[in-house]
Amino acid sequence: MDSLFTPEDSASNGMESHSSEPLAARMRPHSLSEIAGQKHILAEGKLLRRAIEADRFTSLIFYGPPGTGKTTLASVIARSTGSRFESLNGVESNVAEIRAKIEAARTYQTLRDQTTVLFIDEIHRFNKAQQDSLLPHLERGTVRFIGATTHNPYFYVNSPLVSRSQIFQLEPVATDHLVPLLERALNDEERGFGKMKIEAHSDALRHLAEKADGDARKALTALELAVLTTPPDNGTIIIDLAIAEESIQQKAVLYDSDGDQHYDTISAFIKSIRGSDPDAALYWLSKMLHAGEDPRFIARRLVISASEDIGLADSSALQLAISAQQALEFVGMPEGRIPLAHATVHLATAPKSNSAYKALGAAQADIEKGMTLKVPEHLRTRFRKQLSEESGADKAAMHYLYSHDYEGNFTPQAYLPEGRTYYEPTINGMEKRIKDRLDFWRSQFEEK
């Protein structure tokens, strides 16, 4: 399960605490007010909070990084609305288990007039048939469905299920919300460490909150490790900054190799290059490399950016990006990160032009609209021209002018059967020289 807390189905809705449970499980919220963060969807007056308090919701999908409380929120909703809580996991469950949960829900609805919240963690792991098997039961209201996923449901969950659900994104829990959660765990006598003599320094708690990177479960787990492994000093366990640093030694970079973080981070990387900010580009590059992103994927995106965003303003950018890609393949990692950084800084600080990219798009748009043109007679192959001559075509129209026979290796002649302009050079970088040449050549066409 990817959530902060995993509710267990029981007569009391699985909300009892057990001393043998990890701290993160014991501290799972019992009410909306105990949920850390997520004020953008749970603050007073927000749609989701209104729907829960009015008990007016049918199907919900929560998505966001691990540790943001997706399962927690689902269990709190069940408790808040007096519903049974049934859960399945997208990795482990099958259609037979879905049917069993549905049948149990139907029984409780009939005999006890009690609704059931069917929570499915990692809903994106269900195949199409499994997801489709839920649809008729959602339509009948047999269960109230809540799905959770770390992936964007608009891409990874079937459209019929998405269209029947309200989508809410959960964000990483801010440091300022994690610190009070840690303090509550230290002071709670029933579920936390309130019965123990513990002195936790404020800078230590803030360090745990910061290094958890928005993951409440990670913060609580680190706190528990600190408490249980620190020997008492005159009967008091002292959690100082040094202890906190040992308990959460490395910040886990929030990054999923095939989900939102993957796409969002590479998007930030490319947009930073396009926006000529080498510092931001280097940060996003470092984050991807630290998180284990495939460096070849980064190299491919640099090659694309070199043509799309820098283009003819600095044609050496494409050469450098390809060289960086080849250097990466040649030297491997970790040294391969250096040519990637080299190319990143060059592209970010180079003059920018997307004129070739835009010109290609304009030409493609004409073709897609069906505006295809015939090749002019004088540009056709010799064999085709011979056939045209035999058919009595206009010989003047078929005469091709060989550019190298003229001064400056240029002479105006039509290369399209009608005048069209796609490429509009900028005055950025080296492209200004291209613009000057092209302006002269185009003026010759106009004079002719």
Image: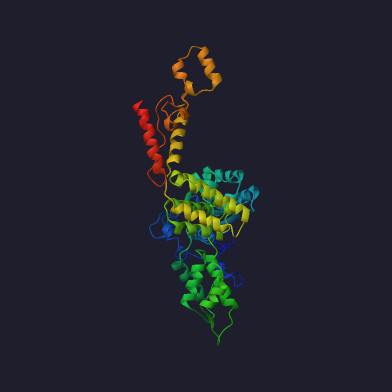
Q: Is residue 261 in sight in this rendering?
A: yes
From the viewer's perspective, tell me whether residue 191 is left or right of residue 273.
right
Give the image location of residue 177, x and y in percent. 45, 67
The image shows a total of numbered marks equal to: 0
Q: Residue at x 41, y 34 (%)?
A: 422
Relative to 285, say whether 360 is above or below.
above
Q: 116 or 133: which is nearer to us?
A: 133
Q: Quadrant of the N terminus?
A: bottom right
Would you identify the image quadrant in which residue 48 lies? bottom left
Q: 109 or 325: which is nearer to us?
A: 325
Give the image location of residue 446, x and y in percent. 35, 28
Give the image location of residue 312, x and y in percent. 45, 43
Q: Quadrant of the C terminus?
A: top left
Q: 290 or 341: which is nearer to us?
A: 341
Would you identify the image quadrant in which residue 383 lies? top right
Q: Residue at x 37, y 34 (%)?
A: 440
Q: In the image as oriented, which residue stretches furthest toward the bottom?
A: 234
Give the image location of residue 11, x and y in percent. 58, 62
From the viewer's perspective, tell me whether residue 68 is left or right of residue 98.
left
Q: Is residue 61 in sight in this rendering?
A: no
